[in-house]
Amino acid sequence: MNIRISHIFFIYYISNYNQFNMRESILNTITNCKTLPKKFRVKDVNKFCNNILINSPSFLSKHCENNPGNYNTFFIRISKGLYTLK
């Protein structure tokens, strides 16, 4: 089986593009949700934003300040499981 580098790059690009779109979609939904409290938990986001984090409940912790994976920071962690927008 002959796999070209260009095919591998294309698959990698598509995978990262889909992750970027999903992240942007989640952020837009959370940011524009008028009923979400200023301090929120994953269950609050799911309750007020149509279960947007049902498949990725670690999204808030991954994207909070001082996260161990050096992910982009969009949230401030107030206490364990409690966040606010940055």
Image (tube, grey):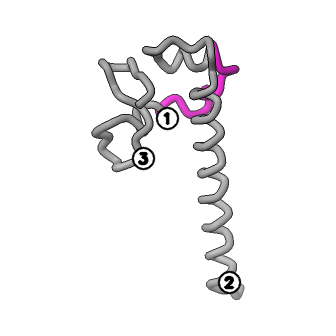
Instruction: Select label 3 or label 2 by which is in front.
Output: 3
Q: Residue at x 62, y 76 (%)?
A: 9
Of the numbered discs 3 and 1, the one sitting upstream in the chain is 1
Of the numbered discs 3 and 2, the one sitting upstream in the chain is 2
**Of residues 77 and 38, the one drawn nearer to the viewer in this rendering:** 38
Asked which quadrant contains residue 86, the reply is: top left
Disc 2 versus disc 1: distance between alpha carbons?
A: 34 Å
Q: Which residue is drawn at 63% across and 26% down?
A: 32
Are the residues flagged by discs 3 and 1 in contact, CB closer than 8 Å? no
Instruction: Select label 2 or label 1 by which is in front.
Output: 1
Residue 59: which numbered mark, if any? 1
Residue 3: which numbered mark, if any? 2
Asked which quadrant contains residue 48, the reply is: top right
Q: How crowded is mark 2: few (under 14 residues within 10 Å), some or many (20 or more)?
A: few
Label 1 secondary element: helix
Q: In which quarter of the image is the N terminus?
A: bottom right
Q: Is residue 18 magenta?
A: no
Q: Is the magenta stretch mostly helix, strand or loop?
A: loop
Q: What stretch is highlighted in magenta?
A: 48-59
Q: Which residue is drawn at 64% across and 58% down?
A: 17
Q: Which residue is drawn at 65% across and 48% down?
A: 21
Image location (x, y in percent) of residue 18:
66, 53
Label 3 secondary element: loop
Q: Residues within 10 Å of mark 1 (few under 14, many from 20)?
A: some
Label 2 secondary element: loop
Image location (x, y in percent) of residue 42:
51, 20
